[in-house]
Amino acid sequence: MLKKTISFFLILCLMLAALTGVCAEGTSADIVEIQKYGNLVLSMSGSAFLDQGFAYGDIVTVAINGQELEMPVGSNYSDVEQGSMICRVVVKPDANEDYMILAINMGDLATTTGIATKEKTEADPGYIWHYTVEEPVTVAFSMKEKGGYYDQWVIHQLVRSENREDYPDLSDEAFANFRPVTTTGMGTGKLYRSSSPVNPEINRNHEADAAAAAAAVRTFINLADNEETMKGYEGFAESYYSGQNFICLNLGVDFSAADFRQGLAEGLRFLASSQAPYLVHCNEGKDRAGFVSAVLEALMGASAEEITADYMVTYFNYYGVQLGTEQYDIIASTNIQKTLAAAFGLESLFDGDLQAAAVRYLESIGMTAEEIAAVQACLAD
């Protein structure tokens, strides 16, 4: 009940903010930071941007590095479908949480705009950005269409709490987004997925680690961190996870990027050479873990309906999104169904042989037929 009350109150506040905005004039800000996944942090606060008349649900023209890009103004990355750009505006009382970020949901805007290149490193935090243009990089904003994305923005509003007490109806496993993958062809107790059992950022690591221990997980595939970062998390040395077999892939969130594809192939080769049960995770267990789980589900013979249902359990665990609602259908169609179909080269996830498409996809990222067969053998009963 508390989670629903929080969600309703926040959405009401955001809707009122959007509706009361005055006509916006143009404005500009500098890029002050490039985050790990290519998101651009700006010098302007979110509240200052809204004070100039922009509002959630507007579509703005963003001029950067000689390019003009159209982006809706939203409050979360998930306000747009995967692969789409967003001008993310966050407004909270804490000044450190009052900011603006330009991003591509599950993409890399810094690389897409050509302003920087990323070098992966073994040292914490696992990456270095190198600007390819003169600094500071200034971004200019102008109004494209007032309220042009408002209806879609309202539908996409998702609010999550990091407090265990706000989810009284969920088990500890569901709170941690931990579950076995049980789709067609998957062996019993072979593959699990969850939020990070070691990263304390979203306050679910202890529950995820305990669930992994109860399931006797032997092999962890960490999609999010490099090893130095992971071992630096508070409590890592005392975790169940630390005593098991693991690989740290430090992957980005652009599933089409060469480093993601290469890293995924490395991770699956590691799986095939390691002992079950296996657990695949990123930070939330939602996007990278969701995509990798979906690929493996398809490889083992799951249908599009099964893959969608498993993916959407995460949105119930975190946000209470219910099957049969418009919000459920929109999230499913604009996230996993669109993303996996694109990766598999299909017009629709509901067309064609998904198992054959998964094999072709894994071959395209560099895996041999023998390696793919080895993964299948490890995941089967």
Image (cartoon, rainbow, N blue to C red):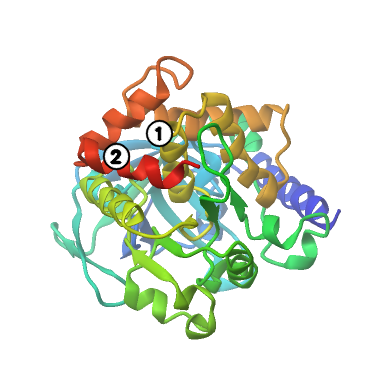
Q: With respect to residue 12, does 363 lie above or below?
A: above
The residue tagged with tag 2: helix, strand or loop? helix
Does 28 sit left or right of 64 as displayed?
right
User: Residue 372 has which mark?
Assistant: 2
Relative side of 285 to 258, left or right: right
x, y percentage for residue 77?
50, 47
Q: Residue at x 44, y 14 (%)?
A: 351
Front position in the image: 240 or 113:
240
For the residue pair 17 and 184, the one nearer the viewer reads as: 184
Q: Amino acid at mark 1?
A: Leu
Secondary-structure class at tag 1: helix
Residue at 65%, 36% (x, y): give it: 154
Q: Is residue 336 visible?
A: yes
Residue 294: % across, % down: 46, 38
**Residue at the (66%, 32%) spot, across then down:** 327
The residue that label 1 is drawn on is 299
Number of residue marks: 2
Disc 2 packing (10 Å; few <14; some 14–19; many ≥20): some
Residue at screen point 14% across, 61% down: 134
Q: Position of residue 160 (x, y in %)?
A: 67, 55
